[in-house]
Amino acid sequence: MGGFHQKIWLITGTSSGFGKRLVASVLARGDRVIATARNLEKLRALFPTPNRSLHFIQLDVSDSAQVVEERVKEALSVWGRIDVVVNNAGYGVKAVLEEGGSLAALTQFQTNLFGVLNVTNAVLPHMRERRSGTVVILGSRSAWRAEVSPAGFYAASKAAVHAVGETYASELRPFGIRVLIVAPGAFRTEGVHAYPATIHNHVPAYDDMRNAGMARFTALAGTEKGDPAKAMELLVDVVKGEGRATGREWPLWLVMGRDAYTDVRAKCQKLLATMDAWEDVATDLEFDCDA
């Protein structure tokens, strides 16, 4: 593949899950990857074969904006540009809201929201200058299933990055920068449900609910029907306009998996039904016309 068509990807959270599979997919297409993770030794163990198209950088997206900016500068110095930034790093806090409180929320948002903002904002000056680039944000269908406990903080963080992604899309469009919000359902990635329940304020009344919720997540692990390798192949198709994305318009949203389609449609239908049921009284709220 010629250098003119070769894209350079910066991908966060590549030591497991979607991230490590995305690295493999991108390299197989002939593109270059700057892969980041908190633990470089783990990355080197995953990709032991020397590859001139693969470069590793240590990055913890929960670090300060200044530290993240320095890491992104290092990434830009590798091949002189970044065409695609993929905000993949993230994890899921498991906590009942009252037991986790604001401390659990801050911990969750530091990685899943503020990390996305810091990485993206560090790359944007370069992309704006070139008037070209693609920003990919890994969200989740959980944003449409916030009723599932004890994953409320995770769902809230993903709903937040979805909203941020929509705002980025409108703010960056004049600079030729595209935004893609990916909302996967359940895929068989390792360790996604490995975190224990977070309890900062134990409330015994929630014991049965919490334990049942944790048991559901434990039972799901390793039985998910979604193939993460296939999901990342589709993501590369969309970014490059190849394969199954050939001839299709650029999507702001890329919902992935049959379960995700079912859940997102169900939430949308429920919301529309509620709006229809209350529209007559909930819209008649304007000032009375002056006589």
Image (cartoon, rainbow, N blue to C red):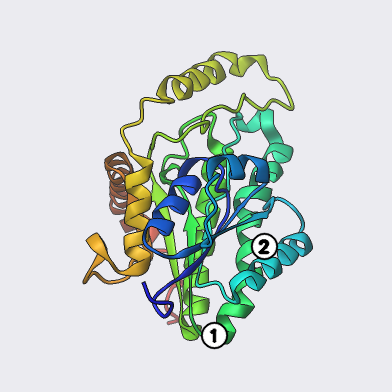
At x 54% / y 16%, what residue is drawn? 211
Q: How many marks?
A: 2
In the picture, measured across the screen, residue 211 lies left or right of residue 247, that is right
Q: Secondary structure at mark 1?
A: helix
Q: With respect to residue 248, does 175 lie above or below?
A: below
Amino acid carrying mark 1 in the image? Arg
Give the mark, 2 or 1, whose residue is nearer the N terminus: 2
The N terminus appears in which quarter of the rendering? bottom left
The answer to whether 73 is drawn above or below residue 184 in the figure is: below
Where 87 falls versus 201 (above or below)? below
Q: Which mark is residue 130?
A: 1
Which of 194/289 is in front?
A: 194
Depth check, front residue: 271 or 39: 39
Horizontal side, residue 62 vs residue 129: left or right: right
Residue 105 relative to residue 142: left or right: right
Which three-letter amino acid code belongs to the residue tagged 2?
A: Asn
Point 36% across, 61% down: residue: 29
- Quadrant into which the C terminus falls: bottom left
Q: Which residue is identified by label 2?
A: 118
> Which residue is pictured at 55% across the width and 48% down the height?
14
Residue placed most toward the observer, 222 or 153: 222
Q: Residues within 10 Å of mark 2 (few under 14, many from 20)?
A: many
Residue 136 lies, in percent from the top left, at 47, 62
Q: Residue at x 23, y 68 (%)?
A: 246
Q: Report, in whole angstroms, how far the alpha carbon at label 2 lies from the one at label 1.
A: 20 Å
